[in-house]
Image (tube, rainbow, N blue to C red):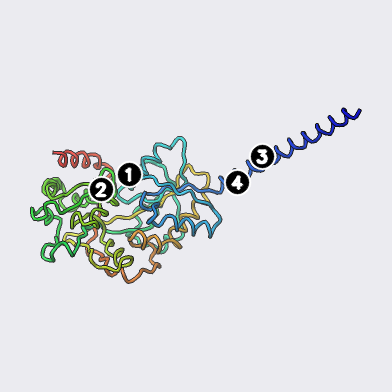
């Protein structure tokens, strides 16, 4: 009798424990699912996500303001991000993609990957920056491509004043270029030469090829070599000198302003059409276009698109060119593959 009672008690304890464990597992699963449902996956370019980029602070501030968690994923440069989202079309991962430039607008819109969003902040963004009339790509920062130079290594009389100047043999081994196939900055120069020289653009590339110290895969490596003193001229932005004024208190690095004008670049943020978290995604876009504008601009050393933003005095060293150039996006979409192939042929000879 005692054994039977003991067995009954043990059975009851075992069943109770199993029920409690099952309940605990259900609660943990439910909590995990709730956390996943409240987490946005955001693809952004590498430098945005890096230790020195604006991404980590932007995410932290957004999470504190909204309670929405963000998984910020470094997804390469603009072209690489777009390719990644296209490859994942049947099994989508990202909810938001940040950093698609105007140069890739036609290709991005043709892919039909993104959803239109008329963000309220668009009312404070100048019309010339709205490069997508469907508002699938909302502009969050912008700048102008430029060649920056080291004023301690390059004499004032040797500062180039045009793209054509850079083909002069006196610059042999003094220029760092960037590959347009792997970098939006490199692509910016390719399109810049198309804007200035038209069908004769390859003549410029043939002339500048011998003056290039190297052609890097991305902006970070190119600019790192430049600041380490390996060459006195590098492809970058007109805003790059402001970084050194703000964070290093030096005006050593400057942007050369060219008489023919500079190619305008605008970076956009988009909501992935297949996202199941559209409302949270819209909140993130709104945050990037408002509260995060000044931090992103000063950390990226670009200009904010929101006209209500305030910038530090250091931006006096970030000249805005009188002429800002931009190719038709449909023209880019139709011809980019050809231009890149032609560029590859010329530069590999």
Q: Dot 1 lies on which element? A: helix
Q: What residue sits right under mark 2 in the picture?
A: 187
Distance in Å between CA atoms under marks 4 and 3: 14 Å
Number of other residues with Cα within 10 Å of mark 2, as a class: few under 14, some 14 to 19, many 20 or more: some
Closer to the chain start, of discs 4 and 2, is 4
Say whether disc 1 or disc 4 marks the residue closer to the N-terminus.
Answer: 4
Residue indicated by mark 4 = 34
What is the secondary structure assignment of the residue under circle 2?
helix
SS under mark 3: helix
Along the line of sight, the residue nearer the viewer: 148 or 195: 148
**Nearer the camera: disc 3 or disc 2:** 3
Would you call the spot at circle 4 few (<14 residues within 10 Å), some (14-19), or many (20 or more)? few
Callout 1 touching callout 2 (CB < 8 Å): yes
Q: Position of residue 178 (x, y in %)?
A: 23, 48
Discs 1/4, front: 4
Q: Is residue 339 in sight in this rendering? A: yes
Q: Is residue 24 left or right of residue 64?
A: right
* Location of mark 3 (residue): 25
Question: Residue 331: in sight, yes or no?
Answer: no
* Quarter of the figure with the C terminus: top left
Instruction: State how far apart marks 1 and 2 are (Cα).
Output: 10 Å
């Amino acid at each position: 009798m005692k054994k039977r009672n003991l067995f009954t008690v043990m059975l009851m304890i075992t069943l109770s424990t199993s029920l409690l464990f099952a309940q605990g597992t259900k609660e943990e699963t439910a909590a995990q699912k709730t956390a996943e449902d409240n987490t946005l996956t955001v693809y952004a370019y590498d430098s945005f996500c890096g230790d020195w980029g604006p991404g980590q602070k932007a995410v932290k501030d957004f999470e504190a303001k909204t309670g929405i968690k963000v998984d910020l994923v470094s997804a390469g440069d603009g072209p690489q991000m777009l390719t990644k989202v296209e490859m994942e079309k049947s099994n989508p991962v990202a909810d938001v993609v940040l950093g698609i430039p105007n140069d890739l607008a036609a290709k991005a819109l043709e892919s039909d990957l993104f959803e239109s969003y008329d963000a309220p902040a668009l009312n404070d963004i100048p019309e010339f920056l709205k490069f997508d009339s469907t508002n699938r790509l909302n502009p969050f920062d912008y700048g102008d491509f430029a060649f920056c130079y080291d004023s301690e290594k390059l004499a004032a009389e040797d500062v180039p004043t045009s793209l054509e100047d850079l083909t002069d043999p006196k610059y042999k081994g003094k220029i760092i270029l960037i590959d347009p196939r792997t970098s939006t900055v490199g692509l910016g120069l390719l399109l810049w030469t198309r804007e200035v020289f038209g069908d004769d653009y390859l003549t410029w590339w043939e002339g500048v090829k011998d003056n290039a110290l190297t052609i890097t895969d991305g902006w970070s490596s190119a600019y790192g070599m430049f600041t380490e003193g390996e060459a006195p001229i590098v492809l970058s932005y007109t805003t790059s000198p402001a970084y050194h004024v703000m964070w290093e208190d030096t005006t050593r690095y400057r942007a050369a302003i060219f008489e023919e004008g500079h190619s305008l670049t605008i970076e956009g943020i988009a909501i992935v059409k297949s996202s199941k978290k559209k409302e949270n995604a819209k909140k993130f876009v709104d945050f990037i276009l408002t509260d995060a504008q000044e931090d992103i601009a000063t950390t990226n050393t670009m200009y904010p698109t929101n006209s209500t933003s305030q910038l530090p005095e250091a931006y006096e060293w970030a000249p805005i060119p009188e002429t800002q150039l931009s190719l038709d996006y449909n023209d880019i979409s139709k011809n980019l593959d050809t231009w890149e192939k032609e560029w590859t042929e010329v530069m590999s000879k």
